[in-house]
Image: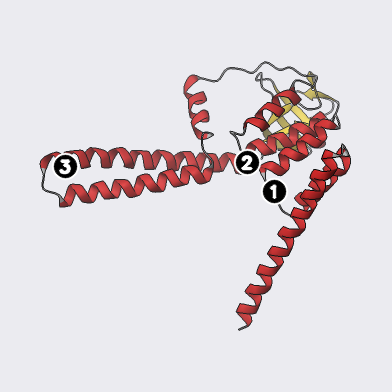
Amino acid sequence: MKNIILILFLFASVVVSANDNQALIDEANKKYNEASYQEAADLYTKVLMNGFESSKLYYNLGNSYFKLKDMASAILYYEKAKKLSPGNEDVLFNLKIANNNIVDKIEIVPELFYIRWWNSLTHFFTVDQWGVVSLISFFLALAFALTFLLVGIVWIKKSSFWLGILFMVLAISSYSLANERFSLFKKDHEAIVFTPTVTVKSSPSDKSIDLFVIHSGTKVQITDNVGDWFEIKIANGSVGWILKNEIKKI
């Protein structure tokens, strides 16, 4: 009886929390439509602090900061929205516009064709979608394997054999893609610069050589960590060290 009461209590708490978050989102949407962008941003942020996140929420928060001309924050939340929904055209479009409004225009180093192909394939579906493809392919492979074992007609056995292999390969490949997608989702190895101007150093020390300068809104990849310093890599391949408090992780 106690367990049932506890479950009902937890369920009621979840429902109340969801209703509270939806009320905050509705109020934030209203403030955004009224051009009260800072109030909208504060309300969206409050929903995040309640433990709720979604691509749409990050997208709306990015839009609010874009209207406030805070491009670093806008890019940060567009990138977070993209992380949850990589194929969302609205997110990608607004992210491109925001990137056009920052100081740094860094030329991206072209990836090798097979890396570019694999990355595109990885982001084609979400983790859950790749998981579904893997499960369906696995069960189809089992079905064709049983058909191969149980049916005596030669052409059906041959077809079942090759189709079973095909779907097993697809199951393994889609599982690998799901795993890769999940790993990318869990990693926090990318960040956005929030300091107006950052001098990137040759080593994790204020006294080290100045290498190059980047500005607020620039996306970096974190490659190492020493004390209060991050080693970062930018899109053109340049590498150096900056202080942790100069960036915010995506």
Q: Is residue 139 left or right of residue 98?
A: left
Task: Give the image location of residue 233, x and y in percent.
Answer: 68, 26
Q: Quadrant of residue 249?
A: top right
Q: Identify the residue shown where x is 83% and y is 31%.
A: 67
| Residue 182 seen in the current view | yes
- Which residue bears the numbered disc 3? 156
**Type of colouring:** secondary structure
Which residue type does callout 1 highlight? Glu
Q: Is residue 233 left or right of residue 248?
A: left
Q: Is residue 63 left or right of residue 110?
A: right
Whole-number angstrom distance, CA of label 3 to CA of label 2: 43 Å
Looking at the rendered image, the quarter that the N terminus falls into is: bottom right
Disc 1 crowd, CA 10 A, few/some/many (<14, 14-19, 20+)? some
- Which residue bears the numbered disc 1? 53
Whole-number angstrom distance, CA of label 1 to CA of label 2: 9 Å
| Residue 246 seen in the current view | no
Dot 1 falls on a residue whose secondary structure is loop
* Mark in the foreground, 3 or 2: 3
Dot 2 falls on a residue whose secondary structure is helix
Q: Earlier in the sequence, mark 1 or mark 2?
A: 1
Question: Which of the two residues, 32 or 72, is positioned nearer the viewer here?
Answer: 32
Give above or below for 20 relative to 74: below
Question: Which of the two residues, 5 or 24, is positioned nearer the viewer here?
Answer: 24
Disc 3 crowd, CA 10 A, few/some/many (<14, 14-19, 20+)? few
Which residue type does callout 2 highlight? Leu
Which residue type does callout 3 highlight? Ile
Q: Identify the residue shown where x is 65% and y is 76%.
A: 6
